[in-house]
Image (cartoon, helix red, strand yellow):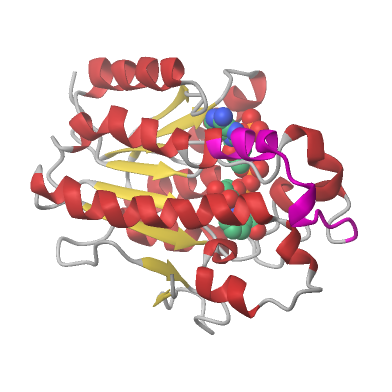
Amino acid sequence: MSSPSRVALITGASRKDGLGYTVARQLSLQHNFTVLLGSRFLSPSLDEAFKQLETDGAKHGVFPLQIDVASAESVQKAAKEVEERFGRLDVLVNNAAVGISSARTEHLREYPKLPLRPTEHTRNDFDEVFAVNVYGVVDTINAFAPLLVKSPSPRIVNVTSVAGSLNYASTIPPDDLRAGFMVYSASKAALKMLTIMYSKDLPKLNPAFKINSGSPGFTKTAFNNYLGTRTPDEGAAVMTWLATLPDDGPNSGFYADHPPYSTENGKFREVEW
Ligand SMILES: NC(=O)c1ccc[n+]([C@@H]2O[C@H](COP(=O)([O-])OP(=O)(O)OC[C@H]3O[C@@H](n4cnc5c(N)ncnc54)[C@H](OP(=O)(O)O)[C@@H]3O)[C@@H](O)[C@H]2O)c1
């Protein structure tokens, strides 16, 4: 089956108060996309999330899609399901991420009071976070690239963070507790490198491809125990913009509409890598 409307998959989109769901909501309600809400598990809360979008007026369909990006098997299964149902994909938003390994959640819970020093990190801290934030993105892009190639305007949006900017990290004073999130920052820096590499390669398969990264800014979600200062709608706007870029839009960039890069919501500016 093919779909007349553009089809977008957003990973990690099951939480109604999260950025992934908010991007799905904006793509669906403001841009008439068919949206696939990617989620690690099929659950009653996912059912509730997609029914809510339908109630709110999603015209072109909202579908839950089980995709655990840390499992290569789950990613392959999801790609097969999308191929059978839609025959192509127009937009992939790599939003799913974890902030810290499961053994360290108290550091996130107590943020910013309990920093984790670089010397305290273990290989396991890296394995768990990179499995989702980096390897998960590689698996997802590779599995869905053959479906994206079939789109007239394929877009990949990697949800990253200023925390992954080498330039920004270099300016953080040694006693600043944000420096404690070393693994997360390293994973988001790696994601930016992936953005550059894929943005050079995928356009060889379809010149209309645009692959970019977006930073939502410090947004009030479960990720930071709701300490963020931006609303999910404000944070999601850069991803929605990158997902709907016109054919003469940028490729390979890293954008934000929050300080210190921009002073106005919706005014997207390049962030230094
Ligand atoms: N909030 C901020 O201030 C901020 C700032 C900069 C960047 N970001 C980025 O924004 C994105 C969304 O974060 P958020 O703030 O909306 O936090 P969130 O609500 O915690 O969303 C993260 C989502 O990722 C999902 N996820 C985790 N592991 C997964 C896996 N293996 N497979 C599939 N999904 C998985 C989570 O699913 P479960 O609910 O099942 O755990 C959750 O739905 C992330 O990439 C984050 O790094 C956030």
Residue 18 showing in the rendered view: no
> Is residue 94 shown left or right of residue 251?
right
Seen at 24% across and 15% down, the residue is 84
Task: Say whether residue 197 is visible.
Answer: yes
Q: Position of residue 40 (x, y in %)?
A: 56, 24
Above or below, 84 against 250 in this view is above
Range shown magenta? 113-130
- The verdict on residue 127 being magenta is yes
| Residue 94 appears left or right of 87 | right
Say which quarter of the image contains residue 81: top left
**Ligand 1 quadrant in view:** top right
Q: Which residue is drawn at 49% across and 74% down?
A: 257
Name the quadrant of the N terminus. Answer: top left
Drawn side of residue 118 relative to residue 240, left or right? right
Q: Is residue 76 above or below residue 211?
A: above
Q: Give x and y (percent) for residue 169.
A: 60, 71
Q: Quadrant of residue 239?
A: bottom left
Name the chief secondary structure element in magenta: helix
